[in-house]
Amino acid sequence: MTAHRHIAVIDIGKTNAKLALVDVQSLTEIAVLTRPNVVQAGPPWPHYDVDGHWSFLLDALATFHRDHGVDAISITTHGACAALLASDGTLAAPILDYEHEYPADIVAAYDAIRPDFAQTGSPKLAGGLNIGAQLHYQFSTDPTLRDRTAQIVTYPQYWGHRLTGVAATDVTSIGCHTDLWSPRKGIYSELPARLGIEGKIAPVRKSTEVLGQILPDIAEATGLPVDTQVSVGIHDSNASLYPHILTQTGSFSVVSTGTWVIVMSMGGTDAPLDPSRDTLINVNARGQAVPSARFMGGREFEIIQQGHQSDPSGRDIADVLASSLMIHPAVDPRTGPFQGRQMQWSAEEPDVGTGRRSVALSFYLALMTDTCLQLTGATGPTIVEGPFARNAEFVAMLQAATDRPVLISEAATGTSIGAAMLMGAPAELVQPTTSSTAKDTQALRAYAKHWRSCVGTA
C-alpha cells in the first residue's frame, strides 16, 4: 500500500456527519468540519439526508485538499445501516433510520425468521438495530423494493460507492449485530436466503483493503488527483479497536468508556455468550470474531453523581473498603449484564458530592466492567481508554478484580484516527502504559469478592 500522510476521514455518526483530516505520522486531526445528521421525516420512512451530506463532504474535501493536501480517503460510520442500490447505482429507496420502530405484526413476522443467537452472535435489538429487521420491514412495506434492489451495501461502503463506483460490504459492518452474518464461521447466516436477498449483498471485504480510486467527476469537483485511493471502510466501534490490534500481541481486551462501556476481548477463552446479559459478537478489521459486552457506564456515572463530582481522599477509600459500602446493580436496568435489576445501596446512601459516594461508584463501575470481561472470556491485559482511564479508583479496582494487568491508553484514539490507520500507520505506535499497583490490593480483592457474592456472580 502506498505511504500516505494526510488521510481525509468521512466519519458519519448518529448525531453528526464529519470530515476530519488526519496526519498519520502524529495521529492528530489537523482539520475538522461537521454537519448535523438530522433525520428526515419521510416519506416513505424516516431517513438520512445523504444528498445534503454528500454536498457537504465534496465541499469539505475540496477545502482540505486546497489548504493541506489530501493523499487518500478513509470511511467510518455508525452501524445498523444498509443502503439498497438500484441497477443504475442510485438508491432504490431512502436509507432507513435505525431508530424507527416497526408495527407489532412486522416485528413478530421477523422474529419468526431471524436465526438463533448461537449462529449470528446478534441479540434481538430494538427498531432496526439489527439490519435484517430493517430489510424485512422495508420489503414488507414496499413489495416492489426487493426486485428494484440490485445490490445491498453497508453504510461505510455507501459512501465508498459514491466515491469510486465500487460496491462492497465490510466485515465489521456486516458482522455488527446484523443477523445476516455468522461471525465465528465468517459466512452468511441463514437470513439472506430467508429474506430472498442471496446474491444481492455486495461482496464482503476486509476494512484494511483499498476499495478503489475516486471517479473522474469526484476528482473534478474536489481537485483531488484521480488516482486518490479510498479504503473499504469500517464500523465506528471497530475503528476505535483497530489501533490496539496493531500494538498488541496475544490475548487482550479493550474497554472503551464513554456513555457506553464496551468491552471487546481478543484471543480469550471461547466463553458461551448470553444475549440476555448484553453480550454479542463483533467482527474486527481483520475479519476475526470479537466477543463483546456492554453497559451504559457513563450514563450510570451521571445518574449517581448528579453533576457533583469530588476527588476522594485516602480516608474516603479506606472507609468504603472497611465498611463494604457498595452499589448493587443496575443503575440503568435497561442495559448491561444485570438487566431488569434495580439498583440498591448496601448501606445508607452517601450524600451527593461526597468522596465516599465517588469511591463506591468507581468500584461499582469497575466490577461491572469485570463482569463484562468475564462474560466475554477475557484473558491477558485489559486496555482502558476514554474518561474512565483517568479514574484511579476505577483502574485500581479493575486490576484487583481481574488479577491481570490494566493498561492505560494515552495515545490518540477515536473513530477518525482508527479509520485513518486503515490507509497507513506511523512506523512506531504509542504503546499503552501499565497502571501502578494499588497499595491496598488485598482489601480491593476482598471487596470485589464480597460484591460478587451479593450480586450472585461469585
Image: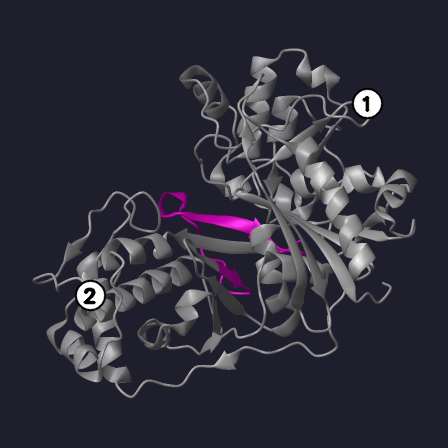
Residue 39 numbered mark, or none: none
For the residue pair 428 and 374, the one nearer the viewer reads as: 428
**Res 286 seen here:** no
Q: Residue at x 91, y 52 (%)?
A: 225
Going by the numbered disc 2, the residue's amino acid type is: Gly
Coordinates of residue 386 in the picture (x, y in percent): 47, 65
Give the CA distance from mark 2 to mark 1. Answer: 60 Å
**Magenta residues?**
264-288
As drawn, 376 above or below 319 = above
As drawn, 160 above or below 299 = above
For the residue pair 293 and 81, the one nearer the viewer reads as: 81
Query: Relative to residue 134, is residue 147 drawn left or right?
Result: right
* SS for dot 2: loop
Of the 4 image quadrants, the one containing the N terminus is bottom right
Question: In the image, which is nearer the foreground, mark 2 or mark 1?
Answer: 2
Coordinates of residue 405 in the picture (x, y in percent): 44, 79
- Using the rendered view, name the quadrant where residue 315 is placed: bottom left
Query: Relative to residue 431, is residue 71 drawn left or right?
Result: right
**Res 174 seen here:** yes
Identify residue for label 1: 87
* SS for dot 1: loop
Coordinates of residue 365 in the picture (x, y in percent): 31, 63
**Residue placed farthest to the bottom in the image?**
439
Q: Residue at x 18, y 76 (%)?
A: 321
Mark 2 is surrounded, within 10 Å at the Cα level, by few (under 14), some (14 to 19) or many (20 or more) other residues, namely some
**Which badge, 2 or 1, comes first in the chain's sequence?**
1
Identify residue for label 2: 353
Going by the numbered disc 1, the residue's amino acid type is: Ser
For the residue pair 190 and 110, the one nearer the viewer reads as: 110
As drawn, 11 above or below 37 = below
Magenta-span inclusion, residue 8: no
**Residue placed farthest to the top in the image?**
143
